[in-house]
Image: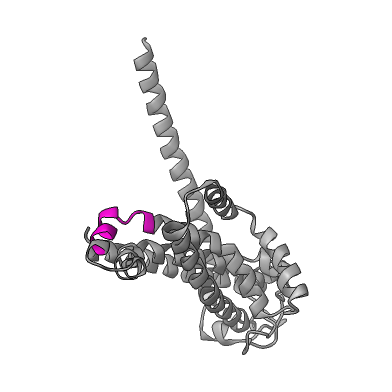
């Protein structure tokens, strides 16, 4: 058997191994999701969504955690999206191509892979202690904004970089300024990728619990937040609180809350896929 045949056999074996690993992972995910659905789907009703937390599992609801999640998500989007998109535009369109820019790009990419607990410690020191925001919704949103900023910046740069150079040159040749070219040509052409990156970044923020626990999000809050400076809880922390209790009713509640969180995450990812597909059909280079 020659070397070419050996390499083909190895390539085929690796292909089958990759397919096996993929289906094994999907099968395990399906088992977990079906188990959660079996335990919690019957618990989901309007009372479960609208009730406040309670020490009685049959009366406990997710209203305060759900409202806290909505507050966190909205404030994180308001803070992170403008800063992340603007930083991506500057670094890609205005930043100079030198050694400092290369180091900065590498560090931004690496920041996207740092464990979320590190951002929680950073938020605890800067926003909770130094800025004096305490255990508030705003402190949690600022911490999660730091978490998702690298993702938004990287996705913005990649989307802008994918726009053909000829589109910029044509706009500049017609007398448009650089900013007019970016605003009217580049951003619309790359908007689908930017929007997809933003939604995926926010999807990650929805499911994060570790940085919010460090910042001081509470497991039990008897009221829904009404201002950015109120104390709060979120769905992942509420789920963790219920899972840690011995009563079977709270285990059922945690499964139902997981289903709600999965629905929110799947909806956000579905919206990202829809807008990306629609944008790709709309924009033709």
Quadrant in the rendering for residue 166: bottom left
Whether 168 is among the magenta residues is: yes
Considering only vertical position in the picture, is 157 above or below 22? below
Quadrant in the rendering for residue 272: bottom left
Q: What secondary structure do most residues of the magenta stretch adopt?
A: helix
Quadrant occupied by the N terminus: top left
Q: Is residue 155 visible?
A: no
Q: Position of residue 174 (x, y in %)?
A: 22, 65
Q: Position of residue 95 (x, y in %)?
A: 47, 57
Q: Position of residue 211 (x, y in %)?
A: 67, 65
In the image: residue 277, left or right of residue 25:
left
Q: Nearer the viewer, residue 223 or 47?
A: 223
Over which residues does the magenta segment extend? 160-171
Q: Position of residue 5 (x, y in %)?
A: 35, 16
Quadrant occupied by the C terminus: bottom left
Q: Nearer the viewer, residue 245 or 83?
A: 83
Q: Nearer the viewer, residue 45 or 22?
A: 22
Residue drawn at (67%, 85%), measured in percent from left and top?
A: 229
Considering only vertical position in the picture, is 147 above or below 12? below
In the image: residue 7, left or right of residue 235:
left
Residue drawn at (65%, 74%), measured in percent from left and top?
A: 140
Residue drawn at (76%, 73%), measured in percent from left and top?
A: 130
Q: How is the image coloured?
A: one colour
Residue drawn at (56%, 78%), measured in percent from left and top?
A: 75
In the image: residue 224, left or right of residue 16:
right
Whether 64 is among the magenta residues is: no
Q: Nearer the viewer, residue 274 or 109?
A: 109
Q: Residue furthest top?
A: 1
Q: Is residue 260 visible?
A: yes
């Amino acid at each position: 058997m020659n070397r070419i045949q050996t390499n083909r056999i190895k390539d085929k074996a690796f292909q089958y191994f990759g397919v096996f690993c993929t289906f094994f992972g999907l099968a395990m995910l399906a088992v977990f999701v079906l188990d959660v659905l079996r335990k919690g789907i019957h618990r989901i009703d309007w009372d479960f969504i609208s009730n406040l937390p309670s020490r009685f599992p049959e009366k406990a609801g997710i209203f305060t955690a759900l409202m806290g999640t909505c507050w966190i998500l909205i404030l994180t989007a308001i803070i992170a999206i403008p800063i992340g998109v603007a930083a991506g535009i500057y670094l890609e369109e205005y930043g100079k191509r030198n050694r400092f820019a290369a180091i900065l790009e590498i560090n931004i990419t690496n920041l996207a892979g740092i464990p979320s607990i590190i951002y929680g410690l950073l938020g605890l020191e800067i926003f909770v202690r130094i800025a004096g925001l305490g255990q508030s919704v705003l402190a949690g949103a600022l911490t999660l904004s730091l978490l998702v900023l690298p993702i938004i910046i990287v996705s913005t740069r990649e989307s802008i970089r994918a726009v053909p150079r000829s589109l910029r040159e044509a706009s500049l040749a017609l007398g448009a300024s650089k900013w007019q070219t970016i605003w009217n040509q580049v951003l619309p052409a790359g908007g689908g990728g930017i929007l997809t990156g933003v939604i995926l970044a926010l999807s990650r923020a929805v499911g994060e619990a570790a940085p919010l626990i460090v910042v001081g999000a509470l497991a039990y809050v008897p009221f829904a937040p009404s201002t950015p400076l109120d104390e709060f809880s979120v769905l992942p922390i509420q789920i963790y609180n219920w899972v840690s209790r011995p009563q079977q009713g709270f285990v059922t509640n945690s499964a139902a809350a997981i289903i709600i969180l999965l629905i929110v995450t799947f909806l956000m990812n579905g919206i990202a896929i829809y807008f990306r597909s629609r944008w790709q059909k709309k924009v033709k280079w």
